[in-house]
Image: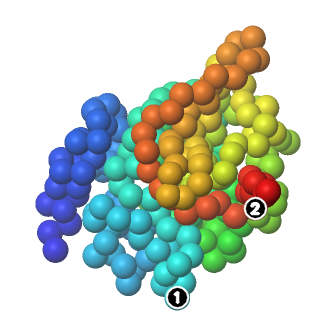
């Protein structure tokens, strides 16, 4: 496989058609080596329009989001160079790497020790010094990191039934949170904004489906 041709085709055939046109985002996707954040045995899938399992012995476990979804989330969040970002669900560290190129500081929470170790090594090899992986329990991850907040932006790299208010309260005035919200098979990428007065607004961006983040509760099911 010609890696650079595959990367070019990923951008032109998958990502641009998904309305990702921000030149800074496209430039990052052309330079940050996605294949280095995919498990070695699955690198042939690095540029494919699919979710890639991160633990080779657990194909039903955590996955990298599709490249087009990662790109669209990054574009919609509009991270600025002076900002502090929190990610929940580090995975292999690829989204943290992308965020680190846009932000001043990134803190990423991961509840699986194997993935936390993988992400740290991937970020180290990529020469990224402004992204830090913090290993937490799943329940701690769902609560965010209030001791280090507030944050300019928060990314949930997976899906949740609903976004806990405790996470929204960790946003600075003017801050944004992006998450994939809903119940399978119907989910939506949703952007939350905190106004300078402290109120929240939300807007739905696009339909997609992603695996659940561990530690977040489900909505109670209706019973007759």
For residue 9, say whether it is visible: yes
Tag 2: Cα neighbours inside 10 Å, few (<14), some, or many (≥20)? some
What secondary structure is found at the residue carrying circle 1? loop
Check the image and name the residue furthest to the top. Answer: 197
Above or below 90: residue 54: below
What residue do we see at 50% from left, 44% from top? Answer: 188
Above or below 96: residue 102: above
Q: Earlier in the sequence, mark 2 or mark 1?
A: 1
| Residue sitting nearer the eye, 161 or 174 | 161
| Residue sitting nearer the eye, 44 or 51 | 51
What residue do we see at 29% from left, 36% from top? Answer: 19
Q: Are marks 2 and 1 in contact (CB under 8 Å)?
A: no
Q: Residue 142 location, x and y as percent?
A: 76, 53
| Residue sitting nearer the eye, 171 or 80 | 171
What residue do we see at 64% from left, 52% from top? Answer: 160
* Nearest-to-viewer mark from 2 and 1: 2
Q: How is the image coloured?
A: rainbow
Residue 57 numbered mark, or none: 1
Check the image and name the residue furthest to the bottom. Answer: 57
Q: Residue 194 location, x and y as percent?
A: 68, 22
Residue 120 numbered mark, or none: none
Query: In whole angstroms, how far apart are the C-alphas of marks 2 and 1?
Result: 22 Å
> Which residue has dot 2 on it?
215
Above or below 109: residue 38: below
Image-quadrant location for residue 121 = bottom right
Q: Residue 146 location, x and y as percent?
A: 83, 41
| Residue sitting nearer the eye, 211 or 103 | 211
- Asked whether, in this view, residue 29 is left or right of residue 69, the answer is left
Above or below 140: residue 29: above
What secondary structure is found at the residue carrying circle 2? loop
């Amino acid at each position: 496989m010609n890696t650079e041709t595959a990367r070019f085709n990923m951008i032109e055939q998958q990502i641009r058609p998904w309305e990702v046109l921000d030149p800074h985002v496209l430039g990052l996707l052309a330079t940050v080596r996605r294949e280095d954040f995919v498990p070695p045995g699955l690198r042939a899938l690095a540029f494919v329009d699919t979710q890639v399992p991160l633990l080779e012995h657990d194909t039903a476990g955590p996955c990298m989001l599709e490249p087009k979804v990662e790109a669209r989330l990054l574009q919609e969040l509009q991270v600025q160079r002076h900002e502090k970002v929190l990610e929940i669900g580090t995975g292999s560290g690829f989204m943290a790497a992308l965020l680190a190129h846009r932000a001043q500081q990134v803190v990423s929470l991961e509840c699986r020790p194997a993935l936390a170790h993988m992400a740290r090594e991937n970020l180290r090899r990529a020469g990224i010094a402004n992204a830090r992986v913090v290993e937490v329990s799943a329940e701690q991850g769902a609560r965010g990191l209030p001791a280090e907040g507030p944050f300019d932006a928060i990314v949930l790299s997976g899906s949740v039934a609903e976004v806990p208010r405790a996470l929204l309260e960790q946003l600075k005035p003017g801050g944004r949170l992006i998450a994939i919200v809903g119940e399978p098979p119907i989910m939506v990428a949703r952007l939350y904004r905190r106004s300078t007065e402290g109120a929240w607004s939300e807007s739905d961006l696009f339909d997609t489906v992603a695996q659940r983040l561990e530690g977040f509760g489900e909505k109670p099911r209706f019973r007759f």
